[in-house]
């Protein structure tokens, strides 16, 4: 039981598993018999996976079983056959597509790879491709879009049944001939099966190169139009302008005007120069009044020796001299554009902003690079105002209040304290009290005398500085009030030091008394232990 599928890329012969899948094979054979698959396209081709077809609409959403033609729309789909189990293990396996509800209609697919076992128990295997594996290879290598649909349609043109073991059901209408395709089936928006995709067929190598260059030029023109360098992609350079290159640096506009004027009247002759240095860039444009004079100069002036240089002449490909207002309303762009109107104002504003930024970064004066860059385009009102800047530095600016003269004196930094030892830092961090021995070391006479001498010297220096400052600014009431406040603080600190010294002397006396008591108790205990030991020996 075999069927031949005649496609647009070759014939495929299929053997059906009639005994294992009778219902699916009956559906497939009778649909082939009524020419249901004619002109059906392969709408889903996934490389090394499957190629799906069987939908007469070509969308993947249509297709009904043969039972709908016998029993109505309620029999459009039928249940899959799962026993005996058959697997997708080889290339060219035919299997029914699932409609999403575990039901089958008319759509089927062909596997393009081996061991697709994850399709088992979901899709019903009902046949195997025995001839035409090369057609499957071509189908697998076809170019598809993002939806896995081939750019060029691949269709089933005709189906031929070689052997049909099933009798025709009652009510099945078999056409006498293959029907013609409908316009909806042919109009898919893709490349037709018989249409040639070779664009340069029948052209010579030179013609193909010329066509490729024209396409590239067209693409470049469209890009220049999008970025604003061309008024229109179809614009053409003028025919009365010559491009002259390989000039000597000493050749001037007047020299070229005299040389080219013998061919006819010239509108303009200009050697292009550097905007900063004014040196020649060694190429020029010569614009004639008549196109015939321009063509005559092109044929006669190429490779002519001018100022010990052989020049090259060609027709100009520049469109900078065209009137852009006629095309897109853009400003006229010549080779040497004269600054005027809003463009001049914009340049002046940008120049003034550059000068202001350079003045902010360098307070000593304007930078030499900015003055060279601006050249003759600077105006008088763009010069930085050094008088305003000097007044701002002198303190007359309105940006904020200035410091009072009496507050400008730098405050004296506190005297450095004794550097704490690591043990003191550890005890201070852990919150532990220092041992009596450490406290006695801190209160030793030598250390106390050194601290008193430091305090006395500091107080003398403080008193001398305060007396000098008092004599210097005794006339200021605010200053006298400040000094009296500092004097009160100093007297208070002296009183607090006296209190601390008295409390420390009391602590020392208490510590000595407790030490004597502890030593007396220790002596009494020692005597008692010695007496007990003597009594024990006796």
Image (spheres, rainbow, N blue to C red):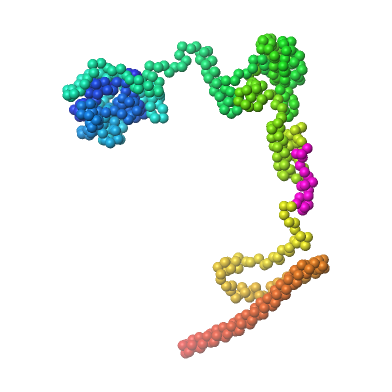
Residue situated in front as seen by the camera: 398 or 433: 398
State the image coordinates of residue 477 (x, y, percent, origin top left).
Answer: 78, 68
Q: Position of residue 446 (x, y in %)?
A: 70, 74
User: Is 397 located above or below residue 424 in the figure?
Assistant: above
Asked if 180 appears above or below 358 in the picture, the reply is above
Q: In this view, does 125 lie above or below 288?
A: below
Q: What residue is drawn where x is 31% and y is 25%? A: 56
Is 386 colored magenta in this rendering? yes
Question: Which residue is pictured at 56% across the width and 26% down the height?
Answer: 223
Which of the 4 image quadrants contains residue 297? Answer: top right
Q: Total number of numbered labels?
A: 0
> Between 108 and 112, which is closer to the camera in this rendering?
108
| Residue 270 visible in the current orientation | yes
Q: Quadrant of residue 444?
A: bottom right
Q: Which residue is drawn at 48% across and 12% down?
A: 203
**Front-most of 257 and 123?**
257
Q: What stretch is highlighted in magenta?
A: 380-397
Q: Quadrant of residue 295?
A: top right
Q: Specify the principal SS of the magenta part.
A: helix
Q: Is residue 501 visible?
A: no
State yes or no: residue 89 in magenta.
no
Q: Nearer the viewer, residue 236 or 6?
A: 236
Quarter occupied by the N terminus: top left
Q: Residue at x 41, y 27 (%)?
A: 145
**Relative image position of residue 389 (x, y in whole percent):** 76, 47
User: Where is residue 342 shown, x and y percent of the image?
Assistant: 69, 32
Q: Is residue 293 left or right of residue 18?
A: right
């Amino acid at each position: 039981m075999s069927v031949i599928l005649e496609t647009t890329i070759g014939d495929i012969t299929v053997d059906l598993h009639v005994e294992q899948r009778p219902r699916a094979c009956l559906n497939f054979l009778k649909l082939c018999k009524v020419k249901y698959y004619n002109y059906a396209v392969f709408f889903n081709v996934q490389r090394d996976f499957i190629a799906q077809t069987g939908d007469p609409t070509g969308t993947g959403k249509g297709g009904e079983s043969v039972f709908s033609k016998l029993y109505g729309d309620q029999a459009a789909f039928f249940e899959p056959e799962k026993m005996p189990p058959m697997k997708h293990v080889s290339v060219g396996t035919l299997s029914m597509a699932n409609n999403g509800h575990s039901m089958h209609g008319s759509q089927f697919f062909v596997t393009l790879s081996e061991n697709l076992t994850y399709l088992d128990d979901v899709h019903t295997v009902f046949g195997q491709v025995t001839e035409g594996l090369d057609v499957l290879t071509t189908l697998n290598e076809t170019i598809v879009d993002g939806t896995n649909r081939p750019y060029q349609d691949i269709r089933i043109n005709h189906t031929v049944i070689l052997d049909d073991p099933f009798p025709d059901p009652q009510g099945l209408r078999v056409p006498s001939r293959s029907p013609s395709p409908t316009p909806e089936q042919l109009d898919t928006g893709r490349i037709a099966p018989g249409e040639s995709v070779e664009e340069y067929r029948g052209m010579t190598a030179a013609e193909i190169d010329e066509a490729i260059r024209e396409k590239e030029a067209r693409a470049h023109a469209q890009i220049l139009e999008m970025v604003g360098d061309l008024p229109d992609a179809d614009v053409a350079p003028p025919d009365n302008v010559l491009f002259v290159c390989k000039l000597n640096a000493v050749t001037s506009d007047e020299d070229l005007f005299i040389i080219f004027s013998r061919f006819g009247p010239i509108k303009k002759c200009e050697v292009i120069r550097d905007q900063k240095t004014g040196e020649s860039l060694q190429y020029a444009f010569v614009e004639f009044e008549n196109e015939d004079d321009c063509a005559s100069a092109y044929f006669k002036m190429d490779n002519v020796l001018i100022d010990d240089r052989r020049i090259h002449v060609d027709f100009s490909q520049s469109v900078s001299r065209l009137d852009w207002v006629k095309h897109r309303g853009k400003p006229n762009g010549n080779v040497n554009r004269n600054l005027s109107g809003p463009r001049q104002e914009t340049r002046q504003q940008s120049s003034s902003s550059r000068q202001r930024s350079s003045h902010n970064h360098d307070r000593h004066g304007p930078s030499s690079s900015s003055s060279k860059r601006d050249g003759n385009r600077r105006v008088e009102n763009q010069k930085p105002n050094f008088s305003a800047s000097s007044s701002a530095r002198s303190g007359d600016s309105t940006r904020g209040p200035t410091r009072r003269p009496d507050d400008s004196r730098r405050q004296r930094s506190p005297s450095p304290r004794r550097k704490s030892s690591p043990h003191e830092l550890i005890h201070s961090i852990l919150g532990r009290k220092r041992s009596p021995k450490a406290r006695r070391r801190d209160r030793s006479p030598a250390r106390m005398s050194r601290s008193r001498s430091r305090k006395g010297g500091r107080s003398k220096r403080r008193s001398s500085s305060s007396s000098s400052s008092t004599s210097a600014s005794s006339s200021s009431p605010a200053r006298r009030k400040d000094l009296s406040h500092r004097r009160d603080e100093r007297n208070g600190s002296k009183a607090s030091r006296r209190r601390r010294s008295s409390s420390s002397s009391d602590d020392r006396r208490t510590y000595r008394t407790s030490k004597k008591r502890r030593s007396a108790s220790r002596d009494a205990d020692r005597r008692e232990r010695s007496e007990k030991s003597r009594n024990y020996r006796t």
